[in-house]
Image (cartoon, rainbow, N blue to C red):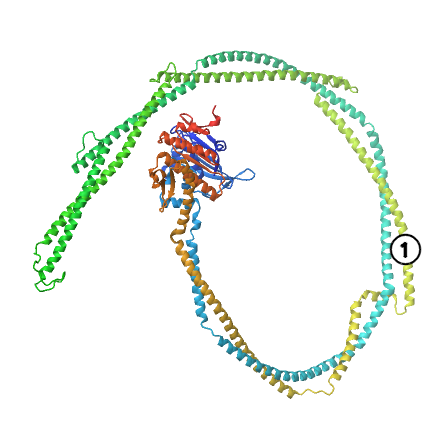
Amino acid sequence: MIPHKLTLQGLYSYISKQTIDFDNLTRDGLFGIFGSVGSGKSSVLEAISFALYGDTERLNRKDNRAYNMMNLRSDKLFLEFEFSNGENRRFLCRVEGKRNSKKFEDVGKLNRICYEKAENGEWIPIDTPVEEITGLSYDNFRRTVIIPQGKFQEFLQLGPKERTAMMQELFHLHRYDLYAGVAELHNKSVKVLDGLDGQLKTLGEIKPEQIEELTLQLEKMKVELANLENEQKGVQDKIAALKRIQELKAKLESAQELLVQLVDKEKEINEQEKELNLYEKSVRLFKSLMDDSHRLKNDVAGNEKSLKESLLEQEKLKKYFDEASVQFQKTKKEYEKRDVMKREADELKKFSEVLTLKQAIGELTKRRQKGEQMLAEKKSVQTDLRGKIQVASEQLIKDKEQLPDYAMLMDIKEWYRHREQLNKDAANLVKQQQELNEQSEDFKSKLQNHGRELSLPMPDGMEALAFCKELLKETELQAVRLEEQLKEMDQNRIRLKVQSELQGFAVDLKEGDACPLCGSEHHPDLLKPHNVHEELAALNHKSDDIQKKRQKTLALEKEILKIEAELLSFRKEKARNEKEVDEIKKETETHLKKFCWEGHHPESPDKLTQELQKHKTLTEVIKNGEKLLEELRTKLDEADKDLKKYEELLTALGHELTAKESRVETLLSDIKHINTDDFREVSAEALNNKSAELIKRADAIENRFKKEEEQINELSRKRNELIGKVSELQKAEVHLKDSLAKNEWKIEELLKQNNDLNREKLAVILASEPNVNKIRKDIEEYRSLLATKRAEVKQLEADLQGQQFDPIEWEKLINRNETLSEKFKKLIDESGQLKSDKKRLEADFLKFKELTKAREEAELRTADLSDMRNLFKGSGFVNYISTVYLQELCKAANDRFYKLTRQQLSLELGDDNMFYIRDFLNDGRVRSVKTLSGGQTFQAALSLALALADSIQKHTSEHGNFFFLDEGFGTLDKDSLRVVFDTLKSLRHENRIVGVISHVEEMQQEITTFLKVVNDEKTGSQVTASWEMS
């Protein structure tokens, strides 16, 4: 992930909106965010974390997070973080929240929205989880990218379980958790094996001899079927011959019957053919002539009607034309006088305008006089305002000269604030010293008590740590003495037990009996009995007392060791306290030397208070003076505008007056035909009405003239067209009657040539319109069928000559054929059943072999999957892969750590997945990472963090290598700080981006690109970039 821009407002100490440009900040690879404690440095990281994940290290949801995160002087919270991921896709996360204006403690839900930048530059809202965009959960994000204060060494010091879980999430090692998949495959394989066993059980045992026996039965049945088939074929041939004779006889009878019917119909068909021939002749000779005669008669009647109508219309049109011509001549005379009327109307209109203009000139003259009076008043106001502005400006200059230097006052105030902070820090350290002294006395008292228990009093003047070592030596000596006493008692206990056993033998032993131990029959000096059990009881009691003393001594040694560890820690804490006291004293002396302001005393800020109050009072006076001056200048601007407006208005009025007077002279010079004296008492409106009336009359005459002229032309055109039409109709009448006479003559001549026809009969025949094609087709089909049937009867009689049908023989053959068919069908069914049985046995035998082979394969696969399931059980493979990743990470971190420690130390991963240190200055021995110094711990943690970032980049295709480190470094000594400086500066030569947050001033001198964060009492935290500083 690479950051580009962060905007924050209303978060913790940030009141006003602050924007951080990471593109400039990260250009050098290494950058810092510096500021004093509480300035708001770490809030930058919290803003990024909350914008991305909606979570922070400082507060959780139960802490009323929305209220506590929002600045108490702000009414809204706003965060906006723009970044790109490893796929070079650009994203923006925005957080907004508002305070309830009516209830201060009520801060609504902080709403988070994420956007992705489209190709067209538009931000598109998305609902993709941020974990998918960055490839990291919140916990791992703050371990690898943004490392909060005090969490930098977390990965180094995590337990094996937590570190393995972190590696699995960072590198998606859950993909190696194959147990579920393998277990599922194993279960499926077991089911397959069970299914195969079930199928084999269903099939049972199948032998090849069964198939061979069925094959022999089928061959035997095949021979029987062939014999039956030959016999049945002979019977069926005889049946077919008899059946053919029977069919020929039936066909002959049917053909003879149909032939009789056709012969009876022959006369009717001949009559029908004769009528058809007569119709075809009538159509061929007379149809066209009869149709022409009918058409010409209709044409003659229509032409006569049109001619009569046209003659009547011609007479009406002549009458209309004559009347229109008389009216047109009257209108023409009026039309020729229209120009005189228009000229008179125009001059009346002009004189009307003259009257209107003279009235307007009078009004304009009055307005100009009034405007000149107002102009004089505005000039007086302008002069008065200029005088007031002069006085106010001089007073403002005097007030500003008396204003104290505010920047200097702020520097003095900051000096007093810093001195007060130093005094508080010094008081806290003194209080801490007192607590440490009390703690020292408590340690001394405890050691004296333990010394009394060991009978070893604490000498006067001896240090507690030295006496602690003396006590440890004493406890060790006492423990050794007690251990030796216990060993001695164990030997005595064994000796007494042996004596007890020997006494038992001695009591039963008599002279002459063989000894069970040595075999001797003579026993001159038998063991004398005494009370061994009492001695054993006393010995055991004493042993228990010594054991209790030893346990008490060991417990005391453990308590003293605990006190020793606390004393070592106490010594470091006391040394640190003394060092901080010295540093505070030096810093106080240095701070006192910085006081360089005359008139002010370092012990009393009273003068500063007076100066600040004076500055505040004068600032208010200056503010009011500036406000007054601004108001006067505004009024002067308005007066200037008014003056200019009146001057422009008067100029415009003069121009308008001149223009109107000139227009009156021009109009009067144009009036030549009317006497203006006759109309001086008439109003302009009446003149306009009279002019409009004359124009209206002239326009009406002109329109009427045009309309009547068009009407005359149209009537003339129609009359000419009608004359031509009558002439054409008269010519057509002569032609049509001539054609009709010729056509009638042709019809009469043809009737004379055909005596079998006359006019009436011809009309009936032509009107019948029979279906000629159908009738002709029916006649031809009849004659063809008659000829065919005569030939068919003749042929059938020839085929049957000498042949007879025997019904008895026919019945015998039919019965025999049915018997053979039933027998054949029965054999076919039996054969089919045998074939089906054989096919089923062959298929089952083949399936049996396939299932047997498949079962062997499934059994082998199930065994293999079972082994794999056991291998992956309990995330064993995932833990193994995680260990491999950790080993690679450790190796990559050592490439840097070994060099940073000047080949003195290296990191190693133990069998328990814990990190250890190999110390090459001490024969390469291995020790805990907790034994490293502050600077060495930082080097180890940084090496691991960089290696982790490199590994994530390699496995997630991230193109940027970026992380933030929020460490104060205030607890490191100078040598450790130098190690940190050298380590961080070495990063400049690598392609990575590292941000450091610290309040240590030496850091700012080492890192040139940085942000400076200052928490101002009024404006809140303010961010300034190094490139913006002068």
Answer left or right for 426 relative to 942.
Answer: left
**Which residue lies at the image location 47% right of the left edge and 44% below the top edge?**
955
Q: Secondary structure at mark 1?
A: helix
Residue 504's place in the image compared with 755, above or below, is above
**Which residue lies at the image location 43% right of the left edge and 50% below the top edge?**
176
Answer left or right for 518 relative to 22.
Answer: left
Residue with the mark numbered 1: 737
**Which residue lies at the image location 76% right of the left edge and 23% below the top edge?**
346
Q: Nearer the viewer, residue 678 or 481?
A: 481
Q: Position of residue 418 (x, y in %)?
A: 36, 23
Residue 412's place in the image compared with 495, above or below, is above
Q: Position of residue 532 (x, y in %)?
A: 10, 54
Q: Nearer the viewer, residue 337 or 956?
A: 956
- Can residue 142 be seen at all in this image of the molecule? no
Badge 1: how crowded within 10 Å, few (<14), some, or many (20+)?
Answer: some
Residue 405's place in the image compared with 543, above or below, is above
Say which quarter of the image contains residue 415.
Answer: top left
* Amino acid on which the number 1 mark rests in the picture: Lys
How many numbered marks does the figure carry? 1
Q: Position of residue 750 (x, y in %)?
A: 91, 65
Say which quarter of the image contains residue 68.
Answer: top left
Say which quarter of the image contains residue 670.
Answer: top right
Q: Position of residue 957 (x, y in %)?
A: 49, 43
- Can residue 676 be seen at all in this image of the molecule? yes
Answer left or right for 358 relative to 90.
Answer: right
